[in-house]
Image (cartoon, rainbow, N blue to C red):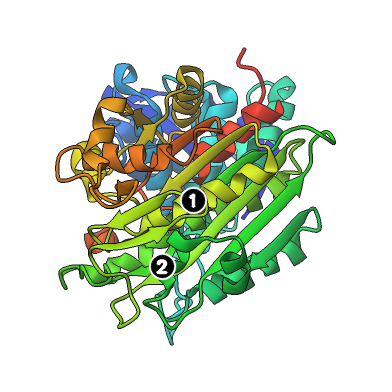
Amino acid sequence: MEIKIKSGDLASQKTPCLVLGVLDKRKLSAPAEAIDQAAGGYLRNVLGKGDLDGEAGRTLMLYGVPGVAAERLLLVGCGKPKDFNRTVYAKAIAAAVATLNQGHTSAALFTLAELRPEGADRYDALRDTVTVAMDKSYRFEQTKSEKKPAPPLKRVDLWVADKADAPTAELAARHGLAIAQGVALAKDLGNLPGNICTPSYLAERAQGLGRDYPALKVQVLEEADMEALKMGALLSVSRGSRQPAKLIVFEYRGGAAGSKPIVLVGKGLTFDAGGISIKPAEAMDEMKYDMCGGAGVFGTMAAVAELGLPINLIGVVPASENLPDGAANKPGDIVTSMSGQTIEILNTDAEGRLILCDALTYSERFDPALVVDLATLTGACVVALGKHACGLFTKDDALAAELLSAGEAAADRAWRLPLWDDYQQQLDSNFADMSNVGGREGGAITAACFLARYTKKLTWAHLDIAGIAWLSGKEKGATGRPVPLLTELLLGRSGARPTPP
């Protein structure tokens, strides 16, 4: 999608469609007010007929409006001023994009950012316009024999009332495009079926990213390499599959030489049947999404490389399948991780932590400033937080605050859960250093406690994204989260995000 910044007299702007906001009780936004004056009260006259009262998400297309250069006007309801936050704003943008695509509109000039939703500055509102517009234009058709025509909306123009704000708008557009492209990549990988998106496929896509972005170096470790590193936990999972495991390592060095990197570790289970502790058949197809943590690393690395951020960043994706087989893990088996700690496997469906623990130990070699892992790790986190926020676990209060703030700024929220040592006893084992599950109580917390045993040398946070990585039902599909949160974190760490006024 192409993005352009425009300013100046709104009535004289030539565009296939001009998008204007209308608040509750038919209150016009400032841009809509200016257009109404240019049109001799035309908008108020139309609204007086009752076709649109400002309800959030409703739209009304107008043609042949006098006194304006735009071919048509799209009025978008934005709700009550006191309730106009970023969620409502996103709903308004999404409704506008849906109407524009249905009306076969190729380009539109958006003015809704002038309403300034609560909790967003100008940069945020303009960036949200881009990310939401691209998200709502996303389609996954790679595996369909007959593909629908691409959405007609190809260009989104952003209007700023004051030309002095154009540099901020340009930056917001550039950042928004990169984030949206990273989200789309993560969605594509998540939506692919397990027979296509195998560990080897992920490795090939990673190498393709390395070719697309020369600043991005990619290394793929094979099972023999992992054997040499004594990654017994990760390899114990892949033994149940005919697909060989891969450890994918991205390296982006955009920061100062010698500056410690940030490391992102993403769970890449390309299909999870549960192993010998096999999952119920219902909705098992959705276990192709168990690699969305890895997909999130792919999307974030692509966004950072696209923007050329001045930061050092490493991405690590342990990729495998978890299937039942004669060589698969059995309940009661004991494996030795790369750290040397032994693990009693009481439930083979708690495999994500087995591949992550070796990847976390591997990340120590980069002497990182920070490590963040992201994983569709537990159903318990979905029960606790639902589909709106990912679970955040860390013992570092400053890091927790930074991640929570990044989530709010990116409209990709997290919620902190405890990581107290009180829960560690649930992982005690009579036969190994620890078990891989801690019972039903606090399942998301004990999973994080397990990972904490492998991060004692690191400044570390864990994001359990099981509730936010994909949608079920009629809108089934990957969401691309938490690419916005992570990219926001890196924008802040690199100093590339503008300081709010």
Numbered tag placed on residue 99 in the rendering: none
Q: Secondary structure at mark 2?
A: helix
Q: How many marks?
A: 2
Q: Position of residue 451 (x, y in %)?
A: 41, 42
* Relative to 97, residue 6 above or below: above
Q: Which callout, 2 or 1, points to the residue nearer the camera?
A: 1
Give left or right: position of 320 versus 439. Answer: right
- Which image quadrant: the N terminus? bottom right
Residue 193 lies in quadrant: bottom left
The foreground one among 109 and 309 is: 309
Residue in view at x 43 percent, y 48 percent: 341
- Which image quadrant: the C terminus? top right
Give left or right: position of 1 versus 92. Answer: right
The foreground one among 375 and 499 is: 375
Callout 2 crowding tier (Cα within 10 Å): few <14, some 14–19, many ≥20: many
* Relative to 330, residue 455 above or below: above
Residue in view at x 29 percent, y 22 percent: 80
Q: Position of residue 326 (x, y in %)?
A: 30, 83
Residue in view at x 27 percent, y 52 percent: 431
Q: Secondary structure at mark 1?
A: loop
* Relative to 441, residue 299 above or below: below
Query: Of the residues shown, which amino acid type is indicated by label 1?
Result: Gly
| Residue of label 1 | 340
Question: Which residue sits furthest right?
Answer: 257
| Residue of label 2 | 236
Question: Which residue sits furthest top?
Answer: 501
Residue in view at x 15 percent, y 39 percent: 441
Query: Of the residues shown, which amino acid type is indicated by label 2?
Result: Ser
Q: Of callouts 2 and 1, which one flags the residue occurring earlier in the amino acid sequence?
A: 2
The foreground one among 378 and 123 is: 378
Residue 273 lies in quadrant: bottom left
CA separation, marks 2 and 1? 14 Å
